[in-house]
């Protein structure tokens, strides 16, 4: 649950940062930026999870890259935790991808109505 809340906060921060810079259509651009970062996180967590499936190759279970370490942290490493984080990151990425065209349509519609 905390992972999802952190992801939501990240999307909001991206939108506010872009809006503060005065860039047009800040919501869709913020979501686009969040999609890029979320995709990188999903790839990182996927690589971490798949490497944890072969503990003999890594001399036990461990975090395989820096981005996965930032997301998962230090305590309680297990294949189930790695898989859980990976699944959540995929869901978040898919939700962001689906919300992107919806946000674009809303921004363009509201932009035309206010102009």
Image (cartoon, grey):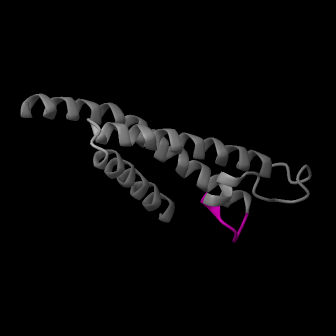
Q: Residue at x 32, y 37 (%)?
A: 28
Residue 98 % position (x, y): 38, 35
Whether residue 83 is situated above or below residue 97 in the rendered picture: below
- Comparing 94 with 111, the one in front is 111
Residue 77 image-quadrant placement: bottom right
Is 74 magenta? The answer is: yes
Residue 95 % position (x, y): 41, 42
Residue 80 image-quadrant placement: bottom right
Q: Quadrant of the C terminus?
A: top left
- Comparing 46 with 39, the one in front is 39
Instruction: Return the residue found at the far left.
Output: 114
Q: Is residue 106 left or right of residue 74?
A: left
Whether residue 88 is situated above or below residue 77 in the rendered picture: above
Q: Is residue 72 left or right of residue 4?
A: right
Q: Residue at x 70, y 69 (%)?
A: 74
Q: What is the tally of numbered marks visible in this picture?
A: 0
Whether residue 3 is situated above or below residue 30 in the rendered picture: below
Residue 108 % position (x, y): 20, 29
Q: Is residue 41 left or right of residue 18?
A: right
Magenta highlight: main SS? loop
Instruction: Return the residue found at the far front.
Output: 21
- Comparing 50 with 10, the one in front is 10
Whether residue 77 is situated above or below residue 39 in the rendered picture: below
| Residues rendered magenta in the picture | 71-77
Is 76 magenta? The answer is: yes
Residue 27 % position (x, y): 30, 42
Q: Is residue 90 left or right of residue 74?
A: left
Q: Residue at x 14, y 34 (%)?
A: 110
């Amino acid at each position: 649950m905390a992972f999802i809340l952190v992801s939501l906060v990240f999307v909001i921060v991206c939108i506010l940062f872009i809006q503060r810079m005065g860039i047009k259509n800040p919501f869709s651009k913020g979501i686009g930026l969040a999609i890029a970062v979320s995709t990188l996180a999903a790839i990182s967590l996927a690589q971490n999870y798949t490497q944890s499936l072969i503990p003999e190759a890594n001399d036990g279970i461990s975090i395989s890259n820096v981005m996965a370490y930032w997301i998962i942290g230090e305590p309680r490493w297990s294949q189930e935790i790695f898989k859980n984080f990976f699944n959540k990151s995929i869901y978040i990425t898919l939700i962001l991808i689906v919300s992107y065209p919806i946000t674009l349509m809303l921004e363009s519609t509201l932009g035309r109505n206010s102009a």
